[in-house]
Amino acid sequence: MKITVLGSGTSQGVPVIGCHCEVCRSLDFRDKRLRVSIHIEVDGNSFIIDSGPDFRQQVLRERINALDALIFTHEHKDHTAGMDDIRSFNFLQKRDMPVYGRKEVLNQLKREFAYIFDENKYPGVPQVQLHEIENTPFVINNIEFLPIEVIHYMLPVFGFRIKDFTYITDAKTISSKEKEKIKGSKVLILDALQKEDHLSHLTLSEALALIEELDVETVYLTHISHRMGLHNEVNNELPENVMLAYDGLQIEL
């Protein structure tokens, strides 16, 4: 299995015109974070979790030429806004794109991208097949996905475990039952927005405390705000098995 971090940031982490903070002025490419998303290659399959506003740029950067399915964690715009750009895969692969999400996510997509679902579609609009998922395992092309429900302020969000890899973004709290699904993972990518308190995201200290509870070999922190600080400096403060993710990071399992 190969995981590529397409984006490790948030809308609060994208460099801002006129901002003079040390992260926005940094020349380290690891401090230039696009909106959070990952690409998973497993057993000949290609999956992407979340298509934010930077989706097209990320796919072109990583030269992703095939996609078997798009899976959504939740309905917030920074995770869904780029879905229109799956039309390129429709053209290349000559088929509809399977799209997976919980009922609330699919309903939001129908509102945000109403033109995709019109009865009389305009030629060239994205072609999708919607698949509703719940908090039970589901299978895509013989690959099992285990949803892990986390809470993002008051919004349920799905993380996913695929074999020995677990991906969780936009989390503030996780129940004991859902934590059990994470334990034993070899690699975990976990939300950690910033060092300061936040209403709907794990802070760095909260993420580190959670990691201590879990039996996980290696952890990468994602959904990073520029308020976290410089990549190199923060990385040096972390435990040996915990690192900041960065755009373009590739992980082999």
Image (spheres, helix red, strand yellow):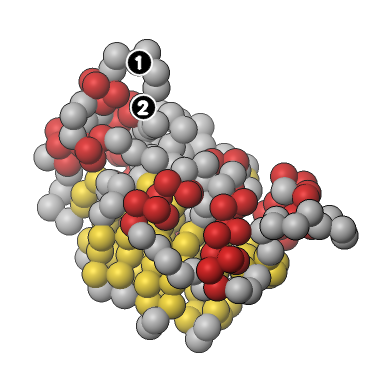
Image quadrant for the C terminus?
bottom left
Q: Amino acid at mark 2?
A: Pro
Residue on which disc 2 sits: 15
Q: Is residue 198 left or right of residue 22?
A: right
Question: Judging from the image, what secondary structure is the residue with disc 2 in?
Answer: loop
Q: Quadrant of residue 167?
A: bottom left
Q: How many marks?
A: 2
Labels 2 & 1 near each other (Cβ < 8 A): yes
As shown in the figure, which amino acid type bears the numbered disc 1?
Cys
Q: Position of residue 189 (x, y in %)?
A: 34, 56
Seen at 24% across and 21% down, the residue is 25
Q: Is residue 75 visible?
A: yes
**Residue at the image point whose x is 49% and y is 80% from the top:** 144
**Quarter of the figure with residue 124:** bottom right
Q: Quadrant of the N terminus?
A: bottom left
Q: Is residue 198 left or right of residue 240?
A: right
Give the CA distance from mark 2 to mark 1. 7 Å
Q: Which type of secondary structure does the marked residue at label 1 adopt?
A: loop
